[in-house]
Image: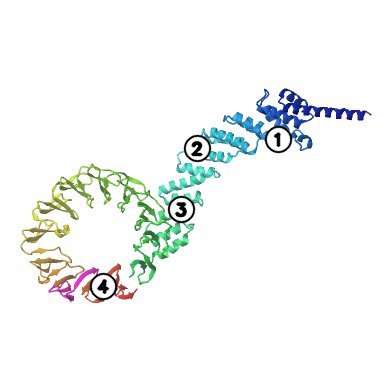
Amino acid sequence: MRKIFALFIICFALKASASKISDAYEALSIFDYFKAKQLFYKTQAKFPCESSFGLATIYYRTDNPFSNIDSAAKYISICQNQFKDTITYSLYHINSESIQILRNKISSKGFETYCNTNSIKDLNYFLSHFYFSNESILSKVYFTRDAILLESATKYQSSDSITEFLLKHPESILYKQGQQNFYDFQYKEKTPTKSLQELQLFIKQYPLNPNVSDAEIALFNLTQQLHSADSVYNFIKKYSTALTLEAGWKLLYSLSVKKYSKDELTNFLNKYPDYPYNETVIKEIALSQNILIPLKNINEKYGFIDTLGNWVIKPQYDDASNFSEGFASVCKNDSCFYINKEGSKTSGYVFDEAESYKDGIAIVKKNNIYFLINRSGQFISKGYQDINESFSKLYVCKQNNLYGAINLKGEIVIPFSYNKLGNFKNKFAYYMSTQYGLVDINNRALEAQWDWISDVDSNFIAIVKKKNQFGLMNVNGQIILPSEYDYVSYCKDDIYLVVKNNLYGFFNSQEKCFVTSVEYNYNPSFEPNYYTNGKYFKLIKDDEVALIDANGRYSINFGTYTNLFFAKCDIIRIQKKNKFGFVDRKLKPITTIEFDKASDFENNLAIVTKSNNAMLIDKSGKALYSIKNGEIKNYHQNLYLVKFDNLIGLIDHNGTVILNLEFETIDEIYNGLFIGTKNNELFLFNSNTEVLKKL
């Protein structure tokens, strides 16, 4: 009986509560918020979902005094957690969709309230009290909060400040960004000056830091600047990865191998047995012994032949240079590049221009900018407007229309401050600012006070010019000869030709005195070697000629000959009126003075012409070979080129014909090797073996 009574009481209570929840929604529908709120609170224990939905609605709305977005968030959360999809809820229009709609409205209003201030406190409050918001809003809030935290931590530029962020927010969408910032700050803190020692220590201590790659590249660049093979090898063994390994080995090879000789290549392999491309070097050792010669075929294309006349690299290039240090520059379709002796390109680079290698370095031009590259094809200098051939191991370059110089390492030695700069011949170069001066390879400069200065010669003397007058100055700035002459030219050894008022004489820079007075008739059409060979001096006066030695003693007096020339092979070529002949040093005749033309003796032979008959004569005057209406030219050591009726041949020093007069052109391409053309065909002639081969 008691059980039945208790059940009755429960049913009555439920009915009463149900009546109250219905009354609450009735009151809510007519905007009686006081009654609705009171009834919802009373029924919350029995109907937590329904009453919480009603309370959330009341607190969300702004047309009542109970409006409170925090309370709305609290009760929509309870509603969502207590919701069960039953028919009872449908009486009050409570379902998944209506809860979601109200939840989104509350979330949006909460977002407007707490998330527009960029306050970490407000953002965290939203995340903890409005956690039911949809993923899009939560992600946005998390991102905003974490971005503010990360920005705040970043402003200290410290890896420690970033560490705190990473520890507190391991699930943050910005965790990777924070981690990258940490690594960047760590790299910056541990390598403030990016010195060799700092970079080496960083690579060893922090291998997981992704900036290790940058550190490795920076370390490689610094090591490269040392230009030390040992330093590069140490880098390869201790710090190099796949990122720099190939470049490191190539750099080591370029620093170690300069002349590309067999001995040098062999020594390289012996010193670095772990060189990963040793098979290439072994092949290069074999190739270094091969002699390849560039040659243009009848179709105007260049290829390379060996000394036997075999085409080793087929004609295909528009231009080609000789092989130098194992590489040759070739051009094809307006692009230039380097090939090895197998005809393979040495790198993927192509250039506008490419010069031959010298001391392991070549000058190239790309996009109108000039660079230095090593044998591995690596650029070792920045780009310049122009780079000149090296002298005294310095390259004169042009940058921003000013001139300076760099060394073989690409380092600036002479600042780019000159309007002009000559090549460093004998370790000095002229320069021009407003006037001309001298500067040495260590950038020590003499005052610019001249209108012009020549290159410095082997006596360490330069010709200077001021107010259109010439003189001599040494590299210490001392005047050797005052600038009061119309012309000064270096001759040979210590001798200079000086001219004043169309009269010439000779000055000895070593003795600092004149060898002769300045009183002889000067003809500017003749080169200085016409007047002296450094030991003897030709004096011309009133259409007469004499010869004196360095002590002023006359070897040949005026009036003896119309003209004379310096002794070659102890024989002097002389001229009387329009005829030539030869005498020995004692002026004893070797031949009569009967030739229309004559050359000096070379290799004990001379070429003369008489009555259109060209002859090759020996020191006794005997004709070893003659040809009527033809020409003979000294061509190569003991070989002479003979031309007749536009056809060419070769004779030897005995006058023996070794190549018949049947070729249109003959050109020497290598020691003792000649290329002849006839009937649009090419022939290779080896003068040593006297073998003629059609190519």
User: Disc 2 versus disc 3: distance between alpha carbons?
Assistant: 28 Å
Q: Which residue is mark 4?
A: 664
In the picture, measured across the screen, residue 203 lies left or right of residue 645, that is: right
Q: CA distance from mark 2 to mark 4?
A: 75 Å
Instruction: Give the residue drawn at x 51%, y 34%.
Output: 157
First in sequence, mark 1 or 3: give its number: 1
Query: Mark 3 packing: few (<14 Cα in 10 Å), some, or many (20+)?
Result: some
The tag earlier along the polypeptide, 4 or 1, is: 1
Q: Work out whether mark 1 precedes mark 2 in sequence or the reverse, and give the earlier one.
A: 1
Residue placed under numbered mark 1 in the picture:
99
Q: Nearer the viewer, residue 324 or 664?
A: 664
The colouring scheme, among rainbow, by chain, secondary structure or one colour, is: rainbow
Cβ–Cβ under 8 Å for marks 1 and 2: no
- Read off the residue under disc 3: 247
**Which of label 2 and label 4 is nearer to you?**
4
Tell whether label 3 touches label 4 (CB within 8 Å).
no
Compute the Cα span from label 4 to label 1.
Answer: 105 Å
Which element type, helix, strand or loop, lies under badge 4? loop
Magenta stretch: helix, strand or loop mostly: strand
Q: Nearer the viewer, residue 351 or 437?
A: 351
Among the 4 quarters of the image, the one containing residue 591: bottom left
Residue identifier under label 2: 189
- Residue type, label 3: Ala
Disc nearer the start of the sequence (4/3): 3
Secondary structure type for disc 3: helix
- Per the rendered image, the range of residues in magenta is 610-639
The residue type indicated by label 4 comes to Glu
**Location of residue 174 in the rendering, given as x and y in whole percent from the top left corner:** 58, 39
Q: Position of residue 234 (x, y in %)?
A: 47, 50
